[in-house]
Image (cartoon, rainbow, N blue to C red):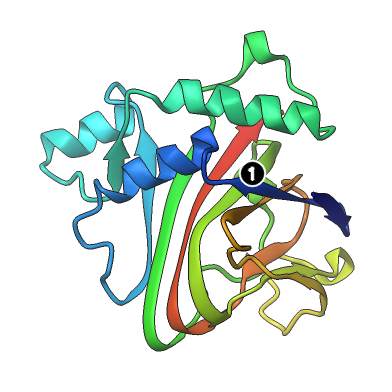
Amino acid sequence: MNTNIKNVKELVLNKNNTIFIFAKELELLVPNIKEEGWHIKNVVLPTNKYYIEQKNEKMTNKFIVSHKLNDIIKIVANIMNDNGYIYNIDNIDYENSNVEFHYANSNYYIYPMFAPHRDNDNGINVNTFICYFDVDCDEGEFAIYDENEYSIYNEKEKTILSKINVKLLNDNIKALIFSGNIVHNGLKFKNGHRYALSFQIPI
């Protein structure tokens, strides 16, 4: 089942999906996965220059290293292609693709790590794929905001146009695809956890 809410493509994937299996493999590499709060790690190849710099300084806790990363990015780009976000599969910009492992746990409320934002704000035009591979909490929807009110310098409350429930569906998981121009964030949640794997792939 696929749906489209305000230019966000909503997918339902089963747990035999390669991306879900990859996310669970990464989860095993995070020793503090149950730590309370909202956390993020960058998923990188062992040859990533930022990882190597941090490794030399013995500061690698911001990273998860995987030799499979480019293969998974290609699979994600193919899924995007199938859903109208067109990529040249033979010419993917792996170097500037950004893959993030988000994990958050709460005995009560967890507030967002990110304010409403665009993924294109870093200067590279991307499409984003988010796989919510383990979600068991109250609230915590994916929110889409009015683009006309948006400025990265504007701290005023912004109007939410729609919310998407990202909880697990029976034996299935939720994934979203959207343009890097969409203003969005994950809303605060309580009583549980929410783990996600996000891919920002240059257009």
Q: In this rendering, would 3 be left or right of 158?
A: right
- Badge 1 marks a residue whose secondary structure is strand
Q: In this rendering, would 67 be left or right of 165?
A: left
Q: Can residue 152 be seen in this view?
A: no
Count residues near mark 1 (Cα–Cα under 10 Å), then give few for <14, some for 14-19, many for 20+: many
Q: Who's the residue at 10% across and 42% down the image?
A: 58
* Residue designated by label 1: 129
Q: In this rendering, would 156 be left or right of 146?
A: left
Name above or below for residue 81 compared with residue 119.
Answer: above
Amino acid tagged 1: Phe
Which residue is at the far bottom? 108
Position of residue 94 measured from the top left corner of the image (x, y, whole percent): 52, 22
Name above or below for residue 2 compared with residue 161.
Answer: above
Q: Who's the residue at 65% across and 36% down the image?
A: 124
- 115 or 195, which lies in front? 195
**Residue 125, located in which quarter of the rendered image?**
top right
Position of residue 146 measured from the top left corner of the image (x, y, whole percent): 85, 69
- 200 or 9, which lies in front? 9
Position of residue 144 measured from the top left corner of the image (x, y, whole percent): 77, 67
Q: In this rendering, would 7 be left or right of 168?
A: right
Which residue is at the far top? 90
Q: Is residue 2 visible?
A: yes
- 144 or 170, which lies in front? 170
Position of residue 170 measured from the top left corner of the image (x, y, whole percent): 60, 63
Q: Who's the residue at 42% across and 37% down the image?
A: 22
Q: How many numbered discs sit on the rendered protein?
A: 1
Quarter of the C terminus within the rendering:
top right
